[in-house]
Amino acid sequence: MFSKIYTKYKPYYKENLHLALPIVGSQVGHTLVHMADSIIVGHFTDTIQLAAVSLVNSIFMLILVIGLGISYGLTPLIAQENGRQNYDECGKLLSNSLIINICVGIFLYVLVQLGIFFVIDNLEQTPEVVRYAKPYLNLLSVSIIPLLIFQTFKQFAEGLGFTKQAMFVSIWGNAINIILGIIFVKGMFGIKSMGVSGVGLSTLIDRILMATVMCFYVLRSQHFKKYLINFKATFFDKVRAIKITKIGMPVAMQYSFEISAFSGAAVLIGTIGAVEQAAHQIAISLAAMTYMIASGVASAATIKTGNNFGKKNFDDLRNSAIASYHVILLFMSVTAVIFVLANNIMPFIYTEDAAVIPIAAQLLIIAGFFQLFDGTQVVGLGVLRGVGDVNIPTFITFLAYWVVGIPIGYVLGFHFNLGVNGIWYGLTLGLLTASILLFMRFQNKTRALKVGVL
């Protein structure tokens, strides 16, 4: 049975992995920035400042995914137009995406600044945690703008199947971020120790460099010459802008519903205590790493699905999508085993605090159980995005995380006195709900395409 399945999908496994692996590298880059921040702060400062990283990341990621989601609206459109060999349209779409993303970046910067002044003091967090969190969050808010410029050119290149370059830029960017982070946080080479603010500054510098390099690569490479004939940085067209945002906004909402659930969980856990919040940061940082790898596979599924959709090759579209499901199920099964077996060891990557480690170890076991659900739900979103199906999946994500996940987590955590574990049990049920409903949507949508209903 397994040999027949492998034989049928083998060509799709190879195609998808060839496209996905570089995307995984660049996607993981987003998480590595925050993971590196947590590790550096955990080892060179104290538990209070690590808790500040947890609080800031929970707030900042909620804002950042709005921008990332809107930037993702470009990729399936580029893939579809490339499939139709409509190269002139690609440059026009890039122009509009760049303008949209810069405007969104400025808007999100202002939103974070308002949060620093009016919201963060009223979240019932430990006062010392809030004191360290504010300057760190301020620096991260500035970095949104260059990051979304980087995303614009990254999503354009990936939509055309050029995925390695963004990976290399992300790798070098993260290396710079780690080196500068250690220097700024610890205080080296005559630079005064900046504490948690140091990783904020290193992240800002890293993202400015990444945006510059990616922009230069796309605009100067011969690979994109035929696609950029109609590209002008000042060109704006209402019809194309709406076309991008019709996909980008629902994608942003999808990410927002999921990330806000985990951010809400972090805030709830912060009301329990700084130790629990630091433990949550460790476990969620590791789980976010595997999620971003799965997200890379999902992005490749979006590109392949969009390309096949543009060619009206619906048999390949469905087979390629199923192959992506197979790949992610295998990978997340491996990470689940690692989380469960190494749960007492992995927290030492971040801290040696004897109070934090056992709580983080318990959370990693729960994270092991939700790995399969987390992977399959994000692949489902990626495939549906490739055919332009974003509205119903957006409702599914809201239902899964804010009708199922957070309410159940709150009840289990506070009314049944399960604490941080109870909140994570609720998140697991939310991921399970999203995984099942999105797979059902995928089945109905792709089968309908094959019989010509849509």
Image (tube, helix red, strand yellow):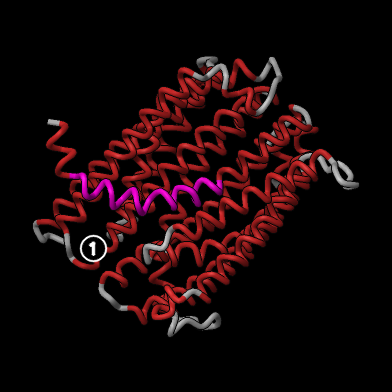
Q: From where the camera sits, is residue 49 visible? A: yes
Residue position for label 1:
309
Residue 294 at x, y = what percent?
40, 42
Residue 420 at x, y = what percent?
56, 22
Packing grade of label 1 (10 A; few <14, some 14-19, many >=20) is many
Q: Identify which residue is drawn at 31% across, 45% down.
A: 380
In the image, residue 191 above or below residue 161: above
- Image quadrant where residue 210 sits: bottom right
What is the span of residues highlighted in magenta in the rendered image?
9-30
**Residue at the extreme left:** 451
| Magenta part, dominant SS | helix
Q: Identify which residue is drawn at 19% across, 49% down.
A: 319
Q: Which type of secondary structure does the marked residue at label 1 adopt?
A: helix
Quarter of the rendering occupied by the N terminus:
top left
- Image quadrant where residue 40 sits: top right
Q: Identify which residue is drawn at 56% across, 39% down.
A: 263
Quarter of the rendering occupied by the C terminus:
bottom left
Specify whether residue 80 is painted magenta: no
| 75 with respect to 99 (left or right) | left
**Residue nearest the viewer, comparing 428 with 210:** 210
- Image quadrant where residue 85 sits: bottom left
Identified by mark 1, the residue type is Phe
Q: Identify which residue is drawn at 77% across, 32% down.
A: 44
**Residue nearest the viewer, comparing 81 with 227:** 227
